[in-house]
Structure formats: C-alpha cells, structure tokens
Image (spheres, rainbow, N blue to C red):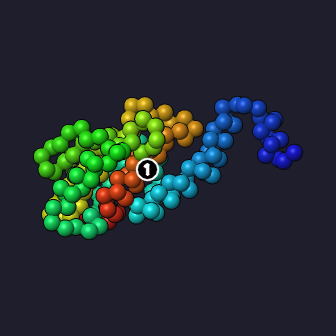
Amino acid sequence: MSALAECRQEAGSTPAVNVVWAVAVWAAAVRPSLRRRARTAGIPLTPDVLARRQTRQLRVLRPSVGWPDRMRTELKASDRAVVTAEKGREELWFHWRPGFRRHTVWGSITFDEAAGTVRLDLREGAEYTGVSGVRRGASFVALCQVAGGLGLVEGGR
C-alpha cells in the first residue's frame, strides 16, 4: 500500500482530508484546463482565475469599420449567449453559458469604438457553489470563450 493511501486510510473522511483532495484534484485537472483555455484565447492566467468576477479591458484583434456592430451580431448569434438588454450602441448585457449545463454567467460588454477596445465584465450567477472546485472558474472560462469568439486579446488601455 502506498504512503498516500495509508495516510488517507488513517485520516478517514474528515473535512480537512476532503479539502486536501479537492485541492489536489483542482491542481491536477482544473488548472491545466484553465491554462489551456487562456493560452488559446490569448488571455493571461492570473492569480484571480477562480474569482467570481472577471473584468478585463481587451483590444480588438482586427479592428475594421463597424467592428462593434459585427461583435454585437456575433454575440447575439452565439448559441451560448442570451442578450438581455442594450444600452444604446455602447453597452450590451447578456447571459453566457460556459459549459453544457444550464449554469450561466452574467456579463456585459462595453464598446469604446475610438480606442478599439472593449471592457468585458463577467460575474458568477446566484447558483455559484464553489464546492470542491465545482463551477469555480466559470467566469474565467466564459471570459476566454467570449474573447476567443469575438477576436479580442489582452492589451487594452
């Protein structure tokens, strides 16, 4: 029997052991997944990756005439997004579904056409549990998905 198995058997199923196992599972499975998503989307992996709220100033990768309208159309056409409100031409509020389940993240995107940047603000919903890493990082996953889908990269002003 390995030393790890012996420690687990001796400790039983105490809350402290469950926390240790949750951290180990996160380190082994979740963090590499988040790192891969961040690299693919061009978003740096920061220490607050599991925070309930992700706010980033991003720049448009290929700005062209009418890029805010194009992004608005792409966001509305996405099967992961449900647009809930618009504040003129400069802001759009939506729900984003980062996974296969019905869990959604609240979001807003604010366009600064003159600077060629957007402010993306994503927040966990009320059903956020955070138990053993379940749904933790959903707002960061949504950030990577939206940024990748709309052609946004880190480096906004």
Q: Which residue is the site of mark 1?
A: 141
Q: Quadrant of the C terminus?
A: bottom left
User: Which is nearer the eye, 20 or 89?
Assistant: 89
Q: Say if 46 sits above or below 94 in the image.
A: below
Q: Label 1: state its secondary structure.
A: helix
User: Which is nearer the eye, 1 or 62?
Assistant: 62
Q: Residue at x 32, y 62 (%)?
A: 151
Q: Residue at x 77, y 39 (%)?
A: 8
Q: Position of residue 1 (x, y in %)?
A: 87, 45
Regarding residue 53, the answer to whether it shows in the image is: no
User: Which is nearer the eye, 145 or 128?
Assistant: 145
Q: Is residue 35 left or right of residue 12?
A: left
Q: Position of residue 5 (x, y in %)?
A: 80, 43
Residue at the left extreme of this rendering: 88
Q: Residue at x 83, y 41 (%)?
A: 6
Regarding residue 116, the answer to whether it shows in the image is: yes
Residue at the right extreme of this rendering: 1
Q: Residues within 10 Å of mark 1 (few under 14, many from 20)?
A: many
Question: Residue 7 sits in which quadrant?
Answer: top right
Q: Residue at x 38, y 38 (%)?
A: 104
